[in-house]
Image (cartoon, helix red, strand yellow):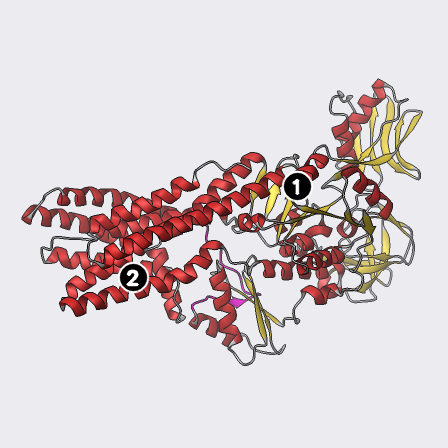
Amino acid sequence: MSVAACPGCAAVDVTRAVEPDGFTHQLVLPGIHCAACIRGVERALTRLPEIAGAKVNLSRKRVAITSTPDADPEAWIVALAKAGFEAHEVSDAEPPRASGEDYTIHMGVAGFAMMNVTLLSVAVWSGAIDTTRDFLHWVSALIALPAAAFSAQPFFRSAVRALIGRRVNMDVPISLAIILACGMSLYEVMHSGHHAWFDAALTLTFFLLVGRVLDQRLRRSAHSAADNLAALEPSRVVRLEDGVRVSRMLSEIVVGDRLWLTAGARVPVDAQLASGGATVDASFITGESDPDTRVIGAPLHAGEIILNGPVTAIATAVGEDTTMRRIARLVAIAEGARGQYTGIADRAAEIYTPAVHILSAAAFLGWYIATGDARTAINVAIATLIITCPCALGLAVPAVAVAATARLYRAGLLITSDTALERFSQVDTVVFDKTGTLTERCLCVPDDVSDRDIRILRALADSSSHPLCRGLARSLHDVTPAPLTDICETVGQGVSARFGKSKVSLEQGCNGTVFQCGARTHVLDATETLLPEARAAVRALRDGGFKIVMLTGDTRSNATEMALALELDDVRAEVGPEDKIAVIKQLERHGARTLMVGDGLNDTAALAAAHASMAPGTALDASRKAADAILVTKDLTTIAAALLISQKATRRMAQNINISTLYNLIAVPVAVAGFATPLAASIAMSASSITVVLNALRGLKP
């Protein structure tokens, strides 16, 4: 076993390792939603001579641009608009994001109209002729045309934006198929034709909308973890001006200002302690829950919490130079890098879209040259477009993803990223934070404490929100708490109350945590213990063939003890937030695909930088936002099960893609040969889509 204080990390300039050239501007991109959007935005911007670089962050819906600091972004916004992307400066108000429910009413209308028109089409194909056939066709038109015009709006809008930007996406052939099918059907009805495509157009629209709804259900409206870190900064700070305490905006604070910090206050900027001793909650930096004592002249980092006070401090770094802003910047950069990931459906669509246009155009030209009949050629081209339109492809990935995420949720894991399953399936190395993830710190009750006093201790522990008290309460879960009165908790000191006429308290003393019950005093030692399922989780991952690494900001001796208990060989001790992200990058440079599991603010950048990530449900909000999935159960063996289920789900997605491909290999020659009637096209589309859905719903077990 090798235990080191992050070997190799000290030599790495973390910011340079993960951060591109400093960007000078940011634009908000409210309409982007996939890897194709990322490429389109970056391509449009980097073509401009004044822009040295552009990098899109999909989760934040922003693009960071490197140019001259005084450049006017108006020309860039215009260029993006020409490319079909809405953009505005960060300072502007961002419009609300669309949710998956935006498609639901479109899907409902399409489904209702599809069922009715299909029934009419079956009546036509059952033998209706002449006036009866024309009447049924006209009724179909009255239902289908307004329904298609409304239901297909999401595809039309997307296609128009793409064409304005002189590019083609999957919605272009979809829109073309719907418009041509409806237009040609109306022409046929007006001329008493034998065939109409209304049913096929609506079937196509309905199944594609089902795929969009399933896909959007996976895209949860989670804010960026970088935004959550920024939200931790206080908006106002008390500054000492000629000995007088004055409330100022954080932006007004400059290096050298003397600040007044009360108990419970979060340090707003990097500073140096100027008066008195301070007890600090440094878990933001170290991830360890034990308070840290600072003396005059000691540094205070932005994001730490003062547990006793008031104290005064002198600002040493403000604005973008503070520890909190630096970590938030690392998180934002890591999120942007992850946002470049292209999913299976996106990769398939890149090949599929041009192929559909080429096939349809070839079918039209071939039949027009062979017959000289434009009407026949158009009908064959429409049949080709409809039969090859990506209903099955649109359902292939979302249907499996929904089934897998439901299976994982029942197992205790909540997926929060639409590409998480694919990235989980590629993981080969699991990186654990120690404290709060694999272990918890607990207070040990001495043997000489009476049963009555243990009941009082349980009641005091229940009354405090401190992590050690929460752990103590869990360890005494089978003890009935005593009735207390006058309960009072003081930040950084402890909790006190009255039991009858006696004063009782649980406080932080010089030698540890002190439990006082009247005249009786007991010292409770704090020990670190493994979480109940930690050994089983590590064993399950090892049996699954995964490499395991443990990162911790704790001391080398504590890390060694826990590593021996878990039988881990690769442990990095005394690792700070920036070192953690450097370790992740170092592992991935050597070919590893990492899964980071952590719960603290100090893990946030590493969670965002890893190939995939998970956070316990008890983790801080910023850590949960940075993760791809949240463990809503305390059973850590869910991690191994989730990775194995993800591998199976990804294989199932590939199977569905292959089913779609096989369907097209059979259906395309039929359509091009002119044998695909409107009803046959609808049935073929429906059959392929239903096959994909049924395959997705087959049991997914680890």
Q: Picture coordinates of residue 489 (x, y %)? A: 79, 36
- Which circle, 2 or 1, is nearer the viewer? 1
Q: Amino acid at mark 2?
A: Leu
The residue at 91%/50% (across/down) is 277
Image height of 577 relative to 251, above or below: above
* Span highlighted in magenta in the image: 84-99
User: What residue is disc 2 on?
Assistant: 176
Foreground of the two, 390 or 116: 390
Relative horizontal placement of residue 461, taking residue 90 as reference (left or right) = right
User: What residue is disc 1 on?
Assistant: 541
Answer few, some or many: residues within 10 Å of disc 1's Cα (few below 14, many 20 plus, some between 14 and 19).
many
Location of the C terminus by quadrant is top right
Foreground of the two, 596 or 652: 652
Q: Which image quadrant for residue 14?
A: bottom right
Foreground of the two, 201 or 279: 201
Instruction: Report the magenta stretch's main SS.
Output: loop
Q: Picture coordinates of residue 480 (x, y %)? A: 75, 20
Residue 406 can be seen in this image: yes
Q: Picture coordinates of residue 563 (x, y %)? A: 79, 42
- Give SS at disc 1: helix
Q: Tell me which numbered mark, 2 or 1, is placed earlier along the sequence.
A: 2
The residue at 78%/48% (across/down) is 571
Label at residue 466:
none
Relative horizontal placement of residue 541, taking residue 278 as reference (left or right) = left
User: Which residue is situated farthest in the top direction here?
Assistant: 451
